[in-house]
Image (tube, rainbow, N blue to C red):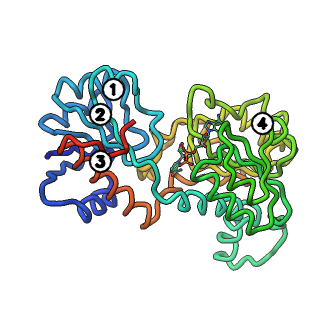
Amino acid sequence: MKVTVFSSQPYDERALRQYSPDNINWQFLPQKLDLLSVAAAAGSDAVCVFVNDDLSATVLQKLSELGIFAVALRCAGFNNVDLTAAKKLGVKVMRVPAYSPQAVAEHTVGMMLCLSRKFHKAYNRTRDNNFDLNGLLGFNLYQKTVGLIGTGRIGIATARILRGFGCELLCVDPIENPELQQLGARYVSLSELYQQSDIISLHCPLTPQSQHLINEETLAQMKSGVMLINTSRGALINTKAVIQALKSAKIGYLGLDVYEQEADLFFKDLSDQVISDEVFQRLLTFPNVLITGHQAFFTKEAMAQISQTTIHNLLSFSRQQNSGNEL
Ligand code: NAI
């Protein structure tokens, strides 16, 4: 079978080739899938896509006109896919439902520690032979209250690590997970979580209900100086409201691995270009903001799992079998 891989990076190609049998003929393309690039998939049996590829109704329609009826997502989230249109067109969409939730959880806690102990500042200082501690005063995670919004695979993996730090855990999720209660965590209302938490970490999917969950009104309910971490999806946060909250010191620390408009920025080296996104540029000016470019998933273990499951999904499609990962 022939598969066109969009938004492909050298590490994607290495990982997919490492685990693929000879009967997959790969076409690796660096560009993202959209209405302009879709024609490049002509002659393929399937496309393989990532978080910022455009799987809107119009793109799916073009894929079906090209005779392509399989989309293999190299990720868990599927907010970029119009599933209703895919069903109508008979395009099968498959994903990688779980690939090392620990990778994202460890990155999340890494961001908390970096911000709370100011590693990002210390790294630069000591390289400049500056060993002054003024301005580096941190705080303990021990006995702090952490609010987790979303307690699925990543939320619970984060909870397990934070229990080791001796944190109190408050959770919000429409589906309560008894393992969290065994860890001593409490399910509470969103407003209680906002009011009580020293640190808030987002681990729910992006849906019409959760879009801009963090906004002017919800920020107003939070503790002054709260730490906010988002390793889930950018649009869970209203970035302009968050910038206001940083300016007023309502937010004391902000860690982002995802950003609402990341499709134009992330996964590319733009170091010799002027970035025209003024909201993003403003975020970068704050000393208490840490941004990574959708890197939380990126470990050897997760890449191996993503490649193996993606290949399983593609081969199942070519054998007209269910992979178990259809949406
Ligand atoms: P999951 O499906 O195992 O868990 C999601 C949980 O969120 C579920 O328990 C669900 O009931 C809950 N939920 C849904 N709507 C909610 C709401 N409005 N408020 C509170 N809880 C809600 O998903 P998993 O694997 O834990 O992933 C979570 C998110 O992390 C994904 O949707 C994806 O957007 C993001 N992600 C980010 C990665 C990165 O590299 N930064 C990598 C992988 C996932």
In the picture provided, is 210 more to the left or to the right than 74? right
Q: Nearer the N terminus, badge 1 or badge 4?
A: 1
Answer with left or right where residue 118 lies relative to residue 1.
Answer: right
Q: Which residue corresponds to the image point at 80% horizontal and 75% vertical from the top-left? A: 132
Q: Nearer the viewer, residue 44 or 160?
A: 160
- Looking at numbered disc 1 in the image, what kind of residue is underneath it? Ala
Residue that badge 1 annotates? 86
Q: Mark 1 touching mark 4, by CB under 8 A?
A: no
| Residue under label 3 | 313
**Mark earlier in primary sequence (2, 4):** 2
Q: CA distance from mark 2 to mark 3?
A: 10 Å
Q: CA distance from mark 2 to mark 4?
A: 36 Å
Give the percent coordinates (x, y) of residue 286: 71, 49
1 or 111, nearer to the observer:
1
What amino acid type is highlighted by mark number 4? Leu
Q: Residues within 10 Å of mark 4 (few under 14, many from 20)?
A: some
Q: Quadrant of the C terminus?
A: top left
Upstream in sequence: badge 3 or badge 4? 4
